[in-house]
Image: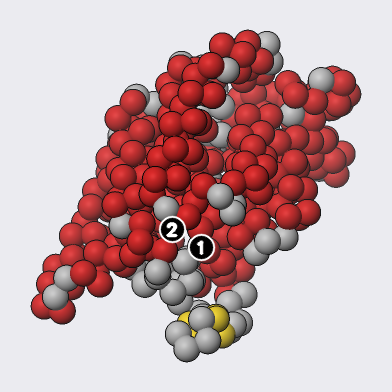
């Protein structure tokens, strides 16, 4: 068996992209907005639990061959630990002794699963159930005021990162729940979820940082564009000054292996900068949009503010924290553009938006499939 490009596998992944788009559209559309009372009339949208089954099975029963790296580039590390119960227990005890470096909660989860079964499919089932369901849950809650569904194609890329970044994406799932709780002003649950995510993967402390900064700045910085620009400039200055401090912390722990091994500048920063630019350009329109969620805009701006430190460290993986909020922000942007044009041109904008997002998703897939060992995809039930 040879790892490399395969058109049949590419077709399967594209079909999964279409599946995500269709089911997420159905999930997000299952609510009606009352423009007179500025509230959402809730409907039963638990159908997303049913929609999650296909991606979960797709991930759990993919063929994995550690000897050649098929199924995910980092899986050999997790498999070796999962198969060695003593080593796993050692990681658990070591992790709680050094909370900031060794991601203890992740190894606790693996250890509990390993005590129940030695079948790695069960480990996959637990992890991918959390990743998939929280992805649907986040977008169900945060995308319900948005009428443009083109950005949802990009969920494929987010999902496929979990094939290699198992630990990171599991922790990120709890960060996403924390972000939803913060949007609902449930601060205790927001902090609790982000702490859980950080204990699974310590780099996700950035998510906890987001929550804390939002609590401080919620009523001050995000009232107009001038204050947002001040926030970005101050963040650049503070993060630049503390850059070497952050590098020393990361270099001392497990995350050292992640530095300077991620994506190129254009892959990691281009959409972040463009999204931030358009959010500022259309700030008043977005702010006046029914159901506007200021926390989503904050996360996009915070992502932009983190660019210097991420480039300094070469730790571009941190951008993945903001992928789903950024998709919501792009939804806001496309909605604003749609409202600014004539009725005859709306169909044209709809087609362009879909083509742009699909093209970008395919581009990112092509740039990452080889390093992530995503091909060939073989269903192994």
Compared across the picture, whether 162 is left or right of 78 comes to left
Q: Residues within 10 Å of mark 1 (few under 14, many from 20)?
A: some
Rendered residue at 49%/51% (across/down): 222
Describe the element under mark 1 as helix, strand or loop. Answer: loop
Give the residue at mark 2.
Answer: 328
Return the x and y of residue 178 as percentages of the image width and height. 67, 52
* Name of the residue lying farthest toward the bottom: 36
* Residue contact between numbered discs 1 and 2, judged by CB atoms under 8 Å: yes
Give the residue at mark 1.
Answer: 293
Return the x and y of residue 247 as percentages of the image width and height. 58, 14
Does residue 173 lie above or below 19 as drawn? above
Return the x and y of residue 125 as percentages of the image width and height. 67, 50
Q: Nearer the viewer, mark 1 or mark 2?
A: 1
Rendered residue at 46%/27% (across/down): 236
Q: How many marks?
A: 2
Q: Residues within 10 Å of mark 2 (few under 14, many from 20)?
A: many
Q: Is residue 178 visible?
A: yes
Does residue 307 lie above or below 250 as drawn? below
Return the x and y of residue 104 as percentages of the image width and height. 79, 30
Does residue 367 lie above or below 116 as drawn? above
Rendered residue at 39%/45% (across/down): 226
Q: Foreground residue, 68 or 18?
A: 18
Describe the element under mark 2 as helix, strand or loop. Answer: helix
Q: How is the image coloured?
A: secondary structure
Task: Name the mark on residue 163.
Answer: none
Quote the CA–CA distance across marks 1 and 2. 10 Å
Q: Foreground residue, 125 or 318?
A: 318
In the rendered image, which quarter is residue 85 located in?
Answer: top right
């Amino acid at each position: 068996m040879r790892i490399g490009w395969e058109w049949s596998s590419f077709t399967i992944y594209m079909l999964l992209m279409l599946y995500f788009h269709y089911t997420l559209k159905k999930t997000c559309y299952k609510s009606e907005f009352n423009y007179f009372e500025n509230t959402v009339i809730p409907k039963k949208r638990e159908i997303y639990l049913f929609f999650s089954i296909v991606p979960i099975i797709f991930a759990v029963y993919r063929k994995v061959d550690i000897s050649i790296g098929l199924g995910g580039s980092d899986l050999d590390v997790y498999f070796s630990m999962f198969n060695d119960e003593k080593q796993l227990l050692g990681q658990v005890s070591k992790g709680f002794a050094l909370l900031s470096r060794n991601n203890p909660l992740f190894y606790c989860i693996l250890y509990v699963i390993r005590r129940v079964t030695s079948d790695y499919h069960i480990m996959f089932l637990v992890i991918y159930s959390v990743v998939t369901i929280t992805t649907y849950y986040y977008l169900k809650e945060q995308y319900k005021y948005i009428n443009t569904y083109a950005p949802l194609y990009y969920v494929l890329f987010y999902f496929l990162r979990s094939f290699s970044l198992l630990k990171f994406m599991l922790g990120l799932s709890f960060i996403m729940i924390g972000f939803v709780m913060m949007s609902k002003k449930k601060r205790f649950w927001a902090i609790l979820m982000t702490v859980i995510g950080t204990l699974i993967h310590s780099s996700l402390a950035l998510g906890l940082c987001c929550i804390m900064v939002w609590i401080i700045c919620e009523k001050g910085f995000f009232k107009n564009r001038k204050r947002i620009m001040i926030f970005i400039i101050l963040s650049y200055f503070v993060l630049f000054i503390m850059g070497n401090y952050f590098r020393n912390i990361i270099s001392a722990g497990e995350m050292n292996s992640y530095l300077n091994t991620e994506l190129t500048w254009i892959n990691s920063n281009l959409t972040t900068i463009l999204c931030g630019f358009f959010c500022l350009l259309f700030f008043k329109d977005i702010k006046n949009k029914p159901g506007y969620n200021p926390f989503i805009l904050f996360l996009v701006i915070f992502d932009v503010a983190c660019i210097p430190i991420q480039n300094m460290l070469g730790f571009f993986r941190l951008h993945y924290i903001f992928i789903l909020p950024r998709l919501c922000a792009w939804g806001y942007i496309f909605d604003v553009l749609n409202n600014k044009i004539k009725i005859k041109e709306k169909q044209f904008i709809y087609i362009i938006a879909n083509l742009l997002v699909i093209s970008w998703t395919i581009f990112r897939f092509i740039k990452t499939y080889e390093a992530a060992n995503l091909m060939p995809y073989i269903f192994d039930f």
